[in-house]
Amino acid sequence: MIDRRFSISHWVAAFFIVLSVIIAMLCGIGLYRLYETGAELERSRQRAAQQELADAISDLAAFLQQQSSIIANWDEVRQQLAEPNFYGYWKASRVQQSGQVSPLFGSFDLYDSSGRLLPGGNPDSAVQLRPDEANKTVFYPDQGLSRIVHAFPIYAGDGQSLLGYGRVSFDFVKAMQAVRSFSYLMPESLTLTSFSPSPVPLQELGRLLNYEISTANEVKMLEEAVTKTYTILAFAMLIAAITAYLFIQRLLARPLAELASAIGELQADEAQMNYVEELESPYMLKELDTVRQSIQDYRQKLSNARLELENRNVVFQQQALQDSLTGLYNRRAFDEDWENLVRALAGESEPLALLLFDCDHFKPINDTYGHHVGDLVLQTIAGAVNEVMRSGDRLYRIGGDEFATLLWGADEHMALQIAERCLNSVRRQDFRQFGMLEPVSISIGMAIDEISKLEDLTRLQAHADAAMYQAKRPGNKKIAIYRHGQSNEDALVANLEINALYQALSTPDKMEIHYQRMMPLAGGREYLEALARIHHHDLLIMPDRFLPVVHGRKLEAEFDLVVIRHIQSDLKSGVVPLETGVSINLSAQSLHHPEIITQLIEMTHHTDRHPLILEITETSLVPQLAEITHFLGILRSGGFKIALDDFGSGYSPLRYLADLPVDIIKFDMGLIHQLNGNDRTSMVVADFARLMRDAGYELIAEGVEDEAMLRKVVSLGFAHAQGFYIDRPHALAPGEAKVAKLFR
Amino acid sequence: MEAKILSNSVKAVTRGSRLPDKFRMLPQRLLRMARRLAKPSLLAACLALSHAPQAAIVEIQTPAGMTATAEYRPGDVGKPAALVLHSFLQTREFGTTKILADALADEGYTVLSPNLTLGISHRKRSLDCEALHLHDMEGDIREIQLWVQWLRKRGHPRIVGIGHSFGATQLLAWRQGARARGFAIVGISLIGSDPFILENKPSRSGKAAPPPKPVNGLIQAPLSFCEAFTAPRDRHASYAQWNESRTLAALGFAGAQTDVILGSEDKYLPKDWNTRLARAGARVKVIWGANHFMDGPQEFDMLDAVIDALKR
């Protein structure tokens, strides 16, 4: 839709343009009328000049008649005609002096009654007067206008007796000028239009003449005066219009436009408060100035209100980005800085080090000494780390006991220095003031890479997580830098697994328990090892994918609780065949969780039908062995057999066997595979197996994948064997228990 | 020689030859004073009302083939006819002559006022001194003779010639030449053809300058009031010979009365002119305060003197 509205400036400009056009048109009409009148006057002057010529010729004729009469009645002329003996002398000395003959006549001569020039006459004059010249004024074209001849008869005093003729010649133009004052015709411009071979009478001379019209000075002056007046008027009107336009612009249009713009700004730019229109200068119109002041006041109030709002927003924002416990930047700030980082890179490549800090054994501390002490520990760690950070580096609290920082432009050496500073700073803290007996440490996972896009940042975070995973492993230096090739950990923070895990934890239906047969080799009971699987978007995610996440996110207790509930459900529902035992994997971390303990104790009701094994994974061991030992003793007394899982994977110190109440040692698959060889390693493993068996432990072999390996473990006294050669993990369907029993 | 009357007014003149009695009974002096006080046009109107004799222009042919004209106003039969002749180169319309003719006509005198042709037929205007003068004294005298004859033929046996200035001299010359005994002449401001010299100039009685040599047959020499009278030498001489001496001599013509009226203030007259005139036989009347033209208040004295002379 076309906006037909125009600003007042446009209307004012349009008004003065229309006004100027009207004035210009009026001036134009006036000038047109003036020039039209001038043209009419010119035509009138043409006619008047024509009439003037005719009148002048008539006047000339009358003049000639009068002059010829004077001459004819001059006594001395009659004297000369009567006695022409001294005519030459008389004509030369007397005629001009007498004043009887007009000086206009260039020549004057007398002829006798027979038309003969008197003796002594002008040599240039015709000797014989032609009869047709008598009493006529004749123009001889061949002699031009300078010689017009007028001849007239001279009679005696009685008026009847012809004495002779007089003949004068004269310049036509001069004669015309003498007999008449011309107003229109310019006598000096008289010229002949055509040539006539024969003499022409004076009365007919007019049609042979061409002439110019004198300039009508009055009309010309009037035209000039009117034109000048119109020009001055036009200029005056133009100046007046411009002045009025500027005045109205200043008085009305500009203030209105500024007010409109200011109101528009109030509507359009309310959030920005960037007022382009300054309304400081007062307006000349009182009413408009009142509006201006109102808007100005409104602006001021609005600005104050907005300022206050912004201040509050800043506070809120700071609060939103600040961790209330430690005063550090929180997870939201970390995420925003991540986004800003992506934006700031703009395709450029920049080295960035991501350091993740994690408090070791925080949960046990929290559980042991209470949340208050836990909070104090976190505050102390935050302060200790933050004080040794570089100026400008931010320290974020991104989780319960997890911290992070981003080091721009830091290489591995610098990142390592900073990490060590942090580590030492925490070590220097005195946590005994909080009533703690154990030392508190942190683990630091670092990842350094050239960052240019979001994917790089995501990858960097995953690498740092993986490094943290490494740093957390018992026996490490608490500081780990991600090295390329840590493929297991690469998948650690894969979004798919993380999402799947969290969904499985929040929605237990996503979790599925598969069971793998642990075949008895010496007539003992048969067990099924419960192995967790997660359904996610039609995918079945295996433990090797999500367990690192469980450990990385310290979700062992939550995860184990869900698994235990599923197994308990399977036991209750009878899916697990009777008399078949179930081996349950349990993280050592979970043994600190009362709910898990409670849940496991509840499961002891099934031990009469389903013997239960609790497989403690060595990688999850924690320093509080006493506590774990206590809980394991309770469970053991309830009917559980305790198995040390993944034995031989390289991480299990032998002292665990001494400290923990372990019934079963479950040899790691890698260790079992060593038995296939005939080398020294095979012999050591075999001897070790015999040694453990001799020490009273039951042995379970994992990863049995062929018959030879099965025979080997049988020969070594393993109580159970487990592996793809025997059975693959699978879900138990209702009724499968009977089939399994029959199968056995 | 034939003369003709150009208008039919002669009969009218005869019928109205006398003024009404009431006018004729008025003292002549009062009438003249009235005319003096009146403007010329008004005077003409008064004259018309007074049933004055109607003037007529008469013509005569001269032997030279010229047509001469004169104004003729017939008067009382018992009174002499007055031949009023204008001064040198003038016409009958000249002031002094005109007044005189009119006054005499009013007095009942038959008046004939000719214009000498001066070689120009039907001459109507005075001739300038600078004009080419082809006339001579003899021609003028012949024309006077013609007009005297014309008057006599018109039945005027008693004729008095009244001339002004050189006109009076020309009358004297005619009378002498014609031996016209008993032809009385009244000369007003009578003067010879000598060049005019003011009174404070040396007397014209001195030796005359020698005449200039003619150029193209013409000479330019002083004559009367003309400083350069242009004429053939003989014609100039015809006038020049009628100088003071010859004029005075003509006054001695036996058997004729000559009255001369002079103005005491006439600056053109020779020294002791009145005395010399009287000595030459003229009856001289000097009008005190009058100039050569007798105009002004002295005009009436001049007229009275003329009438007095006529009555004698």
Image: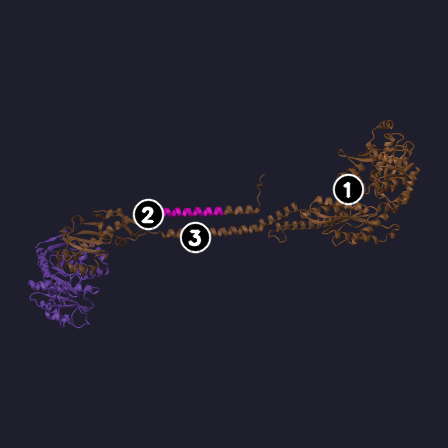
Chain colours: A brown, B purple
- For the residues labelled 3 and 2, the Cα–Cα distance comes to 26 Å
- Dot 1 and dot 3 within a common chain: yes
On-image quarter of the C terminus of chain A: top right
Residue pointed to by mark 1: A488
Q: Say whether mark 2 and mark 3 are on the same chain.
A: yes
Q: Is residue A691 magenta?
A: no
Is A196 positioned to the left or the right of A540 in the image?
left
Q: Position of residue B304 (x, y in %)?
A: 17, 64
* Discs 2, 1: same chain: yes
Mark drawn on residue A698:
none
From which residue to which does the magenta span run?
A20-48
Instruction: Decide: few, some or many residues near mark 3? Use Cα within 10 Å; few <14, some 14-19, many ≥20.
Output: few
Q: Secondary structure at mark 1?
A: helix
Chain assignment, label 2: A
Residue A485 horizontal/vertical position (percent): 75, 44
Q: Is residue A411 above or below residue B231?
A: above
* Amino acid at pointer 2: Gln
Q: Image point 45% across, 51% down: which residue?
A: A231
Q: Amino acid at mark 1?
A: Asn
For this view, does B300 lie left or right of residue A53? left
Identify the main secondary structure in magenta: helix
Q: Which residue is mark 3?
A: A228
| Residue at numbered disc 2 | A46
